[in-house]
Every structure is written in C-alpha cells, then in structure tokens.
Amino acid sequence: MSSSAVRPTPRPLNLWLCLGIPVAAAVILVLLELTDLDMDLAQLFYDPAAGDFIGRHSYFLENILHDRAKQVVIAFSVFAILGFLGAFFIERLKPFKRELGCLVLSLGLATSFVTPMKAVTAVQCPWSLEQFGGHETYSKLLSHRPDTDKPGRCWPGGHAATGFTLFALFFVLRDRRPRLARQAFIFAFALGSVFSVSRMMQGAHFFSHNVWTAIFCWLICLGSYYWVLYRPAIRAEAAPAAQPANA
C-alpha cells in the first residue's frame, strides 16, 4: 500500500479560528439587521424602467449557472456516494472509507438543512416584494412576518448552499493533501459566491441570505470533519505504543 493511502495523522485544528470567524460573521449579520444594507444592495440589481431584476430572465444565469451548475454538483455528490459504497468492497478505496464517508455526510447535511429552514423562517424573496414589483411586504429576518397567503421560501439560499457545501472538500483533504485542500477551499468559496451573486441579480435572495448560508455550510462541514476524521489524541497515544515493537 502506498504511503498516500495510509490514513494520515490529523493536522492541528485551530477551533478558535474555525469557529471564531463564522461566529463573528453571524454577529455582524445580526447587527446589519439594524441597517438597510440588504435592500440597498438589491436595488443595485433592480431596473425600475423594466420593473424587474436585471438577471431575472437571463438564460445564462437561470439555465447554465443555476440549473446546469446545480446538476453538476448533484452528479459529484452521487459519485461521492458511489465511492463511499465502493470503499466497502474495492481494496483501493478501503483506505479512504472514512474520508469518503465524511464527504458524503457533509454534502448531505449541508444541502438538506436548507428546505426545512426555508419553511420555518418564511422569508420572502426580493422579487416577491412590493418594492420590486411584487405583492408581499418586506420584513427582516428577525422581525415578525406579515400575514400572507404565500409565505416566503428564501432563507437561507439554496443555490448558494450548492456551492458552499463544497467546503467539505477542504476538510476531507486537509490532512492528506493540505495544498489541494486550500485550493478546494478557494474553489468552494468562489463557486458559492458566484452562485450567490447570480441569484441576487435575479432577485431570488438578499445578500445576507447567502452569507448566512455560507456560515451554516462551513459549520456543518467543520462539525462533520471533527466528528468523523479529527482524532489527534488517539493518534498521539498510539505512537508511543508502537516504538518498543519497532525497536
């Protein structure tokens, strides 16, 4: 078995950093509830003359960057599941069983939380609001929802989660391939950001919706990694026990 197939010792994990940044971002988002930043940013993508968002009917944004891109990530998730199942039977995949299991768990949790939270929070999409040609009344995340026959389903951002869920790759690769893990982080952050901006251009989400989504996806992937792969204490105890045998 090649050295790359041996399960590596987990690299030190700075939880103060990994948890501190998203918690700080969450606090900032709560404070931004006192401002009109979401509405001001949404106005940048709204064309009053046309009475619609500039990307609302864009073929590229809707069919390529939304539908096709989402299908690619779904296909990747399917291959991850097949890889994890194959790790129970295929010798070359067996050393990577835990990593593949962590990947599948992270991808599943980081996407499945979106729909239930949309139903619970009932936040309206920008395109449904009176300010942007719709019929619904605007309300901030932490405020009371006005009575309506059509509750919103726009918080958190589903399409943003499709990109940010790939934070899972960073954690799965960080112990075995640190450099590739950093590249995976940049890719996931960039992809999630592109998906976020594209949906803002279409009027599907406010800025804060997507930032909250990134925070949730990061914490879910971090938690999955910590629970499934991160075992530094066990590794440290196992090393001294092997020294007499080697001697």
Image: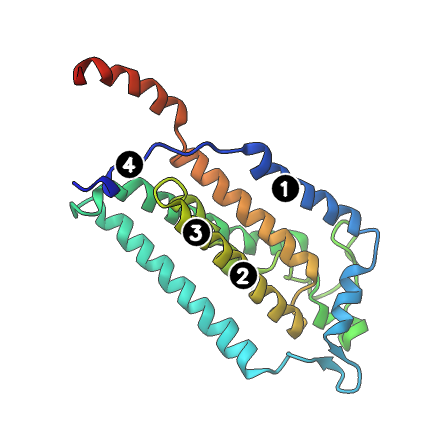
Closer to the chain start, of discs 1 and 3, is 1
- Circle 4 residue: 7
Residue drawn at (79%, 65%), measured in percent from left and top?
39
Closer to the chain start, of discs 1 and 2, is 1
Name the kind of residue labelled 1 in the image.
Ile
Contact? badges 1 and 2 (CB < 8 Å): no
Q: Nearer the viewer, residue 69 or 244?
A: 244
Q: Nearer the viewer, residue 26 or 119?
A: 26
Q: Nearer the viewer, residue 114 or 216?
A: 216
Name the kind of residue labelled 4 in the image.
Arg
Residue drawn at (54%, 63%), measured in percent from left and top?
159
Q: Residues within 10 Å of mark 2 (few under 14, many from 20)?
A: some
- CA–CA distance in space, label 1 to label 2: 17 Å
Closer to the chain start, of discs 4 and 1, is 4
Q: Taking 14 as reference, is 123 above or below it?
A: below
Query: In this image, 166 relative to 124: left or right?
Result: left
Helix, strand or loop at disc 4?
A: loop
Q: Position of residue 235 (x, y in %)?
A: 34, 24
- Circle 2 residue: 190
- Circle 1 residue: 21
Q: Position of residue 64 (x, y in %)?
A: 49, 77
Q: Nearer the viewer, residue 122 or 62?
A: 62
Contact? badges 1 and 3 (CB < 8 Å): no
Name the kind of residue labelled 2 in the image.
Ala
| Nearer the camera: disc 2 or disc 3 | 2
Can you tell which mark lies on residue 107? 3
Image quadrant of residue 76? Answer: bottom left
Name the kind of residue labelled 3 in the image.
Leu
